[in-house]
Amino acid sequence: MANFYSDSHGERWGVMIQEKNQSCGPASVAMTKVYYTSSITGGLEAEARKLSQNYPDNFTEAKGTGDIKNLVSVLRAEGVKTYDALFVQNVWAYLYAYARDNTPVLCHVRWKVGGHFIVCVQVYKTDQKCVFLDPWYGLVEISGAKLPTYTVQDSTGTFEPVATGALSGWIIVTKR
């Protein structure tokens, strides 16, 4: 299912909400492809499902997405130009330099238990807010100064954070 959200700057973003616990990889690949190509042919849900069907060995219930390099191979097979998956110490510097709606950056989040994939589609230079499309939590905005901590606030802003993890340093940077 795709949900649409407005960020703090009034921009609207479509977020593919993952259908299964282990489907953050296909959902993030689908969102990356859609924003990179600026085209959608039948909805984000259809795009994620198509990717899972076209690459059945790459996305399985048992192992989830597997290695981040797997996502690179699927993106490239789908015509999205990417650099190799990188492990970087300063994720913020890469997001600031590369993340835009037509060159999204796929990021890995490390939780206390397990991991998760998200997509950074925008860094506003004026206030240095990063806009993440999170297939589990929706739209997440975080100040670059707070990274690599990845904190999902409750939507009202009145309660304790819903989830806290950290950007692991593993990223996939798309290129033109």
Image (spheres, helix red, strand yellow):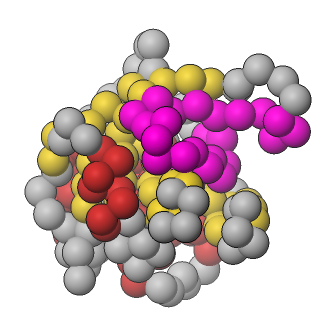
Q: Residue 76: where, in percent of width, then height?
A: 20, 69
Report if residue 135 is visible in the image. Answer: no
In the image, 153 versus 129, the foreground residue is: 129
What residue lies at 65% left-to-right and 52% top-to-bottom?
Answer: 139
Quadrant position of residue 83: bottom left
Q: Nearer the viewer, residue 122 or 146?
A: 146
> Is residue 137 in the magenta section?
yes
Q: Nearer the viewer, residue 66 or 32?
A: 32
Residue 75 coordinates in the image, percent (x, y):
27, 65
Q: Is residue 115 left or right of 126 when viewed as pictured? A: left
Location of the C terminus by quadrant is bottom left
**In this orientation, which residue lies closer to the viewer: 61 or 33?**
33
Residue 103 point in image, percent of width and height: 35, 73
Task: Establish if 99 lies above or below 109.
Answer: below
For the point 45% across and 55% down, the residue is 119
Which quarter of the rendered picture does the N terminus lie within?
Answer: bottom right
User: Magenta segment, which residues?
Assistant: 132-157
**Residue 114, x across and y down, in percent:** 41, 20
Residue 172 in sight here:
yes
- Position of residue 174 relative to residue 134, above or below, is below
